[in-house]
Amino acid sequence: MDWKQQSGQEITVLLSEHPWTAELRKHVGAFEAETGIKVKIDAFAEDLYSDRMNLAVRSAESVADVYMVQMDSALYTQWEAGAVEPLTPYLDDAAKTDAAYDLADYPEGFRAGASFPVGQPDPQLYAIPISFEAYTLFYNKELVEKYLGGKVPATMDELIAAAGDISAKGEGKIFGASMRGKRSAELVDTMTGIVLDAWGSEPASLPYNIWFDGDWSKPRFNDPRIAKGLSYYAGLLKAGPPSALSYGWEDASRFFSQGNAAFFVDASVFGPGFEDAKTSAIAGKVGYAPLPASTGDIGYSGHWSWGISIAKNSAKKDAAWLFVQWATNKKMTAALGVATGGAPRDSSWADADYVKALDAGYVAAVKTQMQHTRPTSVFRQGWSDVVLLVVDAIHQIYQGTAPEDAVAELQTNVQDTLE
Amino acid sequence: MHRDKHIRWLIAPALLLLAAGTLYPVIYAGYLSLLQWNWGSEAKFVGFRNFVRILSGTGFPKALFNTFYFAVFAVVIETLLGLGLALAINRIRIGAGLIRTLMILPLMVSGIAVSLIWKVMLDPTLGIVNYLLSLVGIVGPAWLGTVPTAMPSIIMIDTWWQTAFTFIILSSALKSLPTEPFEAARLEGATPFQTFRHVTLPMLKPVLITVIIFRTIDTLKVFDIIFGTTGGGPLRATESVQTLAYQTAFKSYKFGESAAIAVVFSLIILTLCIIYLMIDTDDGEKA
Amino acid sequence: MSASASFRRKLWPYAVAVVAVAVSVFPIFWILTIALKTRVDAFAMPPVWFFSPVWENFGKAWSATGFSGAFFNSLIVCALGNILALAAGIPAAYYLNKRHVPGRRTILIWLLISYMLPEFLFIVPMYVLFQSIGLYDTVIGLALIYQVFTLPFTIWLLRAFFADIPEALAEAARLEGAGTWRIVWTIYVPIAAPGIAATVILNSIKMWNELTIALALTFDKAQTVTLAVAGFRGYASIDWGAMSAASIIIILPMALFAILAQRRIVQGLSLGAVK
Amino acid sequence: MSAVSLQGIDISYGSVDVVRNLDLDIKSGEFVVFVGPSGCGKSTTLRLIAGLEEGRSGRVSIGDKVVNDVDPAKRDVAMVFQNYALFPHMSVADNISFGMRLRGEPKEKIRANVADVARMVGLSDHLHKRPGALSGGQRQRVALARAIVRKPAVFLFDEPLSNLDAEFRAAMRSELSRLHRELGSTMIYVTHDQVEAMTMGDRIAVLAPLAQTGHSNLMQFGTPEEVYHRPANLFVAKFIGSPPMNLFDGRADEGGIRFGEIRLPMEGQVPAAITVGVRPEHVLLNTGEGPFMTGTVEGTENLGHEKLWFFATEIGRIVARTPDTGNFRLGEAVNLRFPAERLHLFDAATGGRREART
Amino acid sequence: MSAVSLQGIDISYGSVDVVRNLDLDIKSGEFVVFVGPSGCGKSTTLRLIAGLEEGRSGRVSIGDKVVNDVDPAKRDVAMVFQNYALFPHMSVADNISFGMRLRGEPKEKIRANVADVARMVGLSDHLHKRPGALSGGQRQRVALARAIVRKPAVFLFDEPLSNLDAEFRAAMRSELSRLHRELGSTMIYVTHDQVEAMTMGDRIAVLAPLAQTGHSNLMQFGTPEEVYHRPANLFVAKFIGSPPMNLFDGRADEGGIRFGEIRLPMEGQVPAAITVGVRPEHVLLNTGEGPFMTGTVEGTENLGHEKLWFFATEIGRIVARTPDTGNFRLGEAVNLRFPAERLHLFDAATGGRREART
Ligand SMILES: Nc1ncnc2c1ncn2[C@@H]1O[C@H](COP(=O)(O)OP(=O)(O)OP(=O)(O)O)[C@@H](O)[C@H]1O
Ligand SMILES: Nc1ncnc2c1ncn2[C@@H]1O[C@H](COP(=O)(O)OP(=O)(O)OP(=O)(O)O)[C@@H](O)[C@H]1O
Ligand SMILES: [Mg+2]
Ligand SMILES: [Mg+2]
């Protein structure tokens, strides 16, 4: 395979401001040298990114060649809209793909989430994961030591009880948990991670995930396991600071990193930030653990991924593919994974440099959690509307509505919305 | 000067810009509102189904209510406050320029930054506001975090942010009023309030009406400070028409429905404006 | 009335001003402290009142990718946008200030419609349109599309200001041989200067801080400063310091500009030329 | 320089007619004074000539051109507005030179002309000030200067000296007369000042409010002599002269008229009711010969250079004017004589002048 | 009702002094007229009394209260502004009744009072109009009506009749005099009209611009008689009277003064240079006895009731006023006589009046 085959091209890469992106910038020079392709990186903050990326890939003119995409319904919608280029043909072409690339190094679940059409024969791959996040438990070792005698709760019920306890003792300064509760579709993954914990080991398959019973016309939001999962979430919010319902991730993580909360349940990607003494008051004091179990002794959870894709409207797809291939090869995945703490290739977790760069507790926890995660995505138009309804249900439970009543209403609302 | 034949050229450039900027999107939006279209996939003509949907659902009416709740309070407070401040500062001779500049600083902060800073300041635990309140023995509420306090908090944030808008316009309007009627009113024994009521207010009327119209539209279109602080929560307590429409368009990709929301909403605002223009028959009367 | 009463009469506006200024400025001051403190101090409560300022956030903000470029883009967009809005808006305001001109009411309503168009409703069609006519990702395109809200605002506001100017002045100028354009530019514009200054300040602020349209209709060449600031909100981490510093930096040109424009507003004019 | 002619002019504000059926032929280079009670339409007529007001019907010509459709800017007309209409944002100098600057005249010339006319109206020390910092009279002078500096074909002056003191007013009057001679411009001048009306105009147009006359506003258009000494009707007789003419009822009496104890012969057809007028300065006090009536001194006013005397007589109150030398006591009885050749007779029904005296 | 007293008043705009060291004691119920050239500070002084202007120093009292720190609203002063200062957004009726409405007086009373004063100023038909739809004179009458309806302790009139016609003006003068009698209010009245000044005021204050006098603005404060017949200085002599007093240079000559061929004896110390004045109506034409000089008729002005004659003489131009009877031809030589008791003498250096004549 000739890395120089597209030399002289210039490609535009549209990225979200993600730790991966920051790390990538340091390596782009090497790619340019190796391929002779010039790379222009356009990176935007996440909340601006989605809108712009969606405009860019759907436009008639080419705006970006390679772009970062959320490997959930966002990718799915683009696929439906025919805006994204299938990558399988490139992978299958020996002239375009290096023999050492090894797609199988990615866990099956990651690949499945980016292959369409779902559940049909011969699906095509549309994105390659660049980072993943598993929903895990972070704790403040000092506070756990002070209030719980160092014992990390083993079950969800214990966790919530302990968190409530800490809040009660914390005199309005220290709280048991810090969770994001702001009404936003962004909440989908954290929330799904916790519901998956309540769901346990039972199967849940894409595109419906746990939410539908194998058919879009059969929502099961009033399933007792979902009710339980949502009430966990509400319970954790309740054990948090009083304005938790207005907290986005930036507020929840800041609250935790200032040392005011004992527990924080969210994506593993926050880990590296907490260990940075410049931005965190609790660097070196953070403990990591898989989500506490809700039944049995294993805590289940969800994972979620960013991927990169090639825009259908790109005029330089071959050069774009070279970039995608390079950025996701084994070496780069491990190198860039250092920044995200979530390298999506199995091989990375065996990479000494990668593991060494991260907190040992963190690596252990994420590695364990990875064994018990499922995708948090649902592939359906309008899914984010439903997510907001789910968030509303959490808010209701938070405000005191009985979980059963909340999910019953949720079920009706979802039916209305999807009808 | 009715005989001025060229006067119609004065409006031409504005009409041109206006036509270019609005005709196409307005027609487009009207058309979109009749479609079921998910941006990319096939568009399907569904007639007025989108309208029926949004009007019969709970989301839109709730958002509409919230929006008016917000708008009414924000406009009233900001107008009164802006007017009061403009009147007060108008009496200041020395340092007025500096004071005015400092007072319009909030307006210069972008919506994102406003949301961030106020969320930081209003944090019940880590925020300066409740800390300062605690110094005087008040236990501050959870501001953005509870249903009853969320919207008032947003109104408060908007008041901080946008009062400068009404203030600066009314300030300059006060500056351009003729001084003679004020002197006459003083001699007639008018108290400051009476002067305000009978002289200042009527003379400010054209500007004041304009300010209110634009503030009303602005507040009805409220988006960034809600999006940035509560995202419409808790429990939809702060969801506005714009956040709903945004969500519908850019998060759910339901462009037809989003356009329908916009159309209904525009019609409501339009009706308000037309009612105003009908009532206001004697605008522009001169001495 | 005693001397102290008259003293009080003169002082209360200052008291009001002090409170108003304090309330207006405090949150901005707070942003500034976040920019100047270390991240950990920034959010400590009770607040850390005494700290040695960390200036690096400002350097970091300014040198962040695209920030300075975006800064100048925004300046150009503001300048162009204001020029367009005034060039088209002043004559239009004059026209619409007259009572019996054709289409007056219709145009006034149309202006309001234009102003109230939800941005996300027209960014999709505009995105498509701009790409096909080459205005996508240009400062000119942005300045043009901003007229959708700056123009209505300018026209309505100036119309209200023009309403206070006695018609006799226009008549006098006309007899002196001035055509309509001259009358507008040499009589109405200078007399309504406070109003125009306020309009320009407000338009500038609005364009400077506009996010949604800029997000949709620019890519990199014409990226504006608000987009650049939003860039400090990263994924799973916000560079609070740099973001705050950037927020302060982007207030500066507007503030500077406002100070200049203030003069016009403060001066005012006594219209003591007409009985 | 240009004749101004109005033909069949009607002007109304909304549904209210202000001017109706006005015909006026002003000769080129003539100095015409408009007088009339407040609200009778003087300013409106000037504005019509300037092109600032549009008549409902009628024809306006300047020179030999019908100007109904000509832009005010192109009529070569300068106007001193009754309310000054100064530009508040310009200095006095800039106000005055506005028109010249518009026409792009050379800076040097502008400066020289402004300096000239400023000296003429006594504003040399105020050229840098804005109108807001001027006194009332100073503002009026700026308005005057702005018109004068233009040297147009037609000047329209709307009470241009009303706020000036007597001394200055006299000076300005002669300046304007000089200007009129030098430029030969047509000038139309509205004033409430009797002295100005009498001394400045080649002809005087006396206007009345429509409400009072019903048909047309123009009551008389003639030389000052004519208007003062041969008022065309009662309206003019009352309006011109200060204090106004004494008027009293007379009645036809054997081919003559009689009022009080005085009887005058009269030729031609004598109207049944007649109004007799005599100006205060023509009432002879204790002098002259012939029939007289007795008046009792009721009051006096000393104007400095002259005195007014108010008498109660059998026909009503009579005012007489004398040089300040005369002296009567209050209550004193004085013989009042009215020289026949000084009497004015008007048909009491129509108000028209009757000249039927031998 | 209230005396108005100014003591040591200085007023300046920025660095320019407009009024300096003004002392004026106006008695309660007095009618005082302010006259003076345009820009001399009349309006400024009224505004000071009203409280709209703040002096740099000095004391203003109304009644027996020092009002320097009293709000204008509380001074019980009504003012007719020179520029009217009407409320543009209110109807005439509302303009007039503004103060009454503020005080919450009963509707019925307001309506009645407004109707009364509107009738008095002739605005009954215009009560519903806004100022913008009024003629200049009508606006002025609204301003007048607004002040009158108040019936305050002190009235300040700033040229309240300048835009009214002679007939109406005369009517208003007597209305104001009646009001003055009835209310007993103190009235201060600025005018440029000599007739008004002479007839209306109990006393006249003659003001001069600071620039011309240097020390103080007040040139004379006395009854109309005094001011007209015994002007305190050259300034007053020139300013009062229209046409103004004839002034010419005289010189000391053997215990008397001489001008032209005329010599007058004079007692006391005679200043080296003296200015002699005589009013136009005191110049005798071809009559009287004693020394005369010859003047050639240069021009004439017919004011209707009187004539002005302009003579060229060896001492300069002399104006004479006669009843309209006299008649001279242009160029005719006429004997001019100046009765000694009618002459005014002023020290040419200081301008002060000299009474040193026997
Ligand atoms: N706001 C001001 N700023 C500066 N100078 C002023 C201001 N107002 C008035 N003046 C000056 O003060 C002087 C006195 O003005 P004032 O209005 O009192 O004159 P006036 O005697 O009323 O004259 P007029 O008879 O023309 O009305 C004038 O020379 C005028 O130019
Ligand atoms: N804009 C207007 N709308 C309605 N009526 C008006 C308007 N302007 C003037 N008038 C009326 O028209 C009549 C004539 O006004 P005009 O100004 O010509 O009078 P004028 O003779 O100049 O009086 P003055 O001597 O008082 O200046 C007045 O009765 C006035 O009330
Ligand atoms: Mg007029
Ligand atoms: Mg004055």
Image (cartoon, coloured by chain):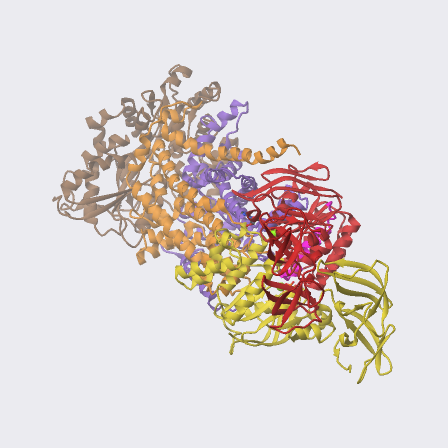
Chain colours: A brown, B purple, C orange, D yellow, E red
Q: Residue C101: give x, y in percent of width and height.
A: 52, 64
Q: Residue A383: give x, y in percent of width and height.
A: 40, 43
Q: Nearer the viewer, residue E229 or B275?
A: E229
Seen in the picture, residue A195 relative to D76 is either above or below; the reply is: above
Does the magenta run of residues contain E148?
Answer: yes
Q: Nearer the viewer, residue A341 or E307?
A: E307
Magenta highlight: main SS: helix
Q: Extreme front residue here?
A: E254
Does the magenta run of residues contain A244?
Answer: no
Seen in the picture, residue A404 relative to A60 is either above or below; the reply is: above
Q: Nearer the viewer, residue E293 or C103?
A: E293
Quarter of the image containing the C terminus of chain B? bottom right
Seen in the picture, residue E206 relative to A307 is either above or below; the reply is: below
Any part of residue B40 in sight: no
Q: How many marks?
A: 0
Where residue A337 sits, quadrant-wise, is: top left
Where residue D260 sits, quadrant-wise, is: bottom right
Magenta range is: E133-153
Q: Is residue E5 left or right of residue A416?
A: right
Q: Extreme bottom residue here?
A: D268
Q: Residue B221: give x, y in percent of width and height.
A: 48, 47
Any part of residue D117 in sight: yes
Q: Residue A327: give x, y in percent of width and height.
A: 21, 39
- Residue at 41% in and 37% down: B113
Q: Nearer the viewer, residue E251 or E239?
A: E251
Q: Is residue C200 left or right of residue D6?
A: left
